[in-house]
Image (spheres, rainbow, N blue to C red):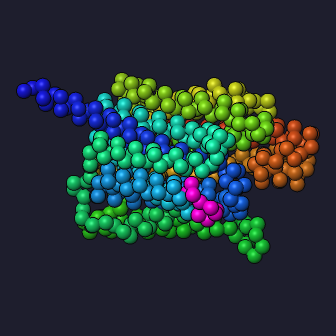
Amino acid sequence: MTAEPQDQARDAGNRRWLGLAVISLGVSLIVVDATVVNVLLPSIVEELGLRATDAEWLTSVYSLVFAALMISCGRIADLVGRRRMFVIGTGVFVVASLLAAMAATGGALVGARALQGVGAAMIMPATLSTINTLFSGRDRAVAFGIWGSMIAGMAAVGPLLGGWLATSHGWRWAFTINLPLGVLLVLGVLRYIPETRDPDGRPGIDWGGGVLSALGLGALVFALIEGQTFGWWTSQKDGWPLTPVPFALGGSVVLLSLLVVLERRRARAGKAVMLDLTLFEIASFRRGNIAASLISVGELGLLFVLPLFLQGAHGDSPLQIVVAILPLAIGAFFSGGLAARLAQRAGPARVVQYGMAAEVAAVLAIGLTTHAGTTGYGLAPWMLMYGIGLGMTSAQLSNVALAEVPPGQSGQASGTQSTARQVGSALGIALIGTVFATSLGHAMQARTGDAEVARELQSNVGTTIADLSPVQADAAVESLAVATGRAALVTAGILGVGLIMTLRLRRKDT
């Protein structure tokens, strides 16, 4: 008689871990698709004859829609069911991937990428909130370790996978492969993941809050992503004295301020809210979100700068880039298990601090040692250290940030944290990219005295070195090294602020 309940408990435990494997596959799918297009872009431009505007939107629209909708999708998942939201989101993502693979024009491909962003925004908070609800105690640290290492590692795998697919099979396969994976996801979730939702949620949906959060966050991410393209203030186009970027930033401030006012008013009236602002009164949640943004600033900023340096310094061969980035992915994947074991002994907050310290040390080393002759092999040890730190931090930061969040509010809390990561990613590319480009121009002008060549190199972030004379090319490579070092030092400073923030995550926060 006693064996049957034990067998049922064991079966439920096994199903839960199999469900985690399915969720991790879903996370891998949407994270890879966030970075894979950057590598596929030259092939897509050539085949479809994309205009510059289409190419720009193709690289940014996915992240833009993804970030804009996550808070709303997370809250709706709390109300209608997280498993249901995951399944619907996967269906949307698969349909969008099919449309992308079949796209015959740039506009059609951009539209498909936007629809992929909708699906991704439905999937991501559903995965994180499900883990937060289903796992507790020691198992919780392990589960978040697996989830976090997938987030960190797959961001680095995306460019590598994109390069292989573009070279071996063509860019359309990067989207086609999502179809069978999506079917496996839906079947796995329906079999292994139980439905969870907020049993105490107030009736109704805060549509006004959803619209304001989507528009406000969308405007913010648009400004951060497109600042490099349009210019941060002055427009280069005739008849346009200003770029849309300051208007987007101003609009985001207004819209997000209105969101805060609306949510407070609805909460006082006892009505349903899209974002419960009392979540930010939880110290671990508030600090964890800030740290998540800063970590993403570092990761995406570094992944933006290093390939540009290696390509400019060593030509078009992807080998140097692979050698540099692959250790990051390996370190991130395998440190998840280490982070889980350390979390059980020292606590998740301490693991986050160890990981942040490793990230700061690795990026600082890159900034201090990079020179014109640095290769992917020279960067590999530091990238491995960075990947280990990133895996440890990403693995347990969500555990810390969501530890005190009521299970019924896991969806909106998860959506908020995922949004913080996306905003950080956009800020990383904008901020670190600006430091890199500006330093590149200044260093080139100091070496050549030719302001026009320096401006051209800066505007093309080092991708036109092959068109320069041998003397100018040598100066450009040296300038790339200087710019990369400065960008890495700024990144280390930002991550240092993140480390200071994690020092305030006390043991009781976990």
Residue at point 37%, 56% (across, down): 88
Question: Is residue 143 placed above or below 122 in the rendered structure?
Answer: above
Q: Position of residue 488 (x, y in %)?
A: 67, 38
Name the spot of residue 381 as percent of width and height, x first: 63, 25
Q: Residue at x 45, y 37 (%)?
A: 148
Give the residue displayed 76% in from the left and 40% down from the top. 316
User: Which image quadrant: the N terminus?
Assistant: top left
How many numbered markers are drawn? 0
Q: Is residue 110 above or below residue 123?
A: below
Is residue 150 among what the camera can see?
yes
Outermost residue, bottom side: 239
Nearer the observer, 29 or 172: 172
> In the shown orientation, is residue 368 left or right of residue 195?
right
- Looking at the picture, how far across and down is residue 424, in whole percent? 54, 49
| Magenta highlight on residue 314 | no
Q: Identify whether 359 is placed above or below 197.
A: above
Please indicate whether residue 69 sits to the left or right of residue 7 in the image: right
Image quarter hosting the C terminus? top left
Q: Toward the viewer: 88 or 52?
A: 88
The residue segment tinted magenta is: 100-108
Q: Is residue 502 left or right of residue 510?
A: right
Q: Nearer the viewer, residue 330 or 444?
A: 330
Can residue 117 be seen from the camera position used here?
A: no
Q: Is residue 5 above or below residue 206?
A: above
The single residue placed furthest to the left in the displayed view is: 1
Residue 323 on image: x %, y %: 66, 30
| Majority secondary structure of magenta residues | helix
Which residue is pictured at 73% across the width and 67% down the height? Answer: 235
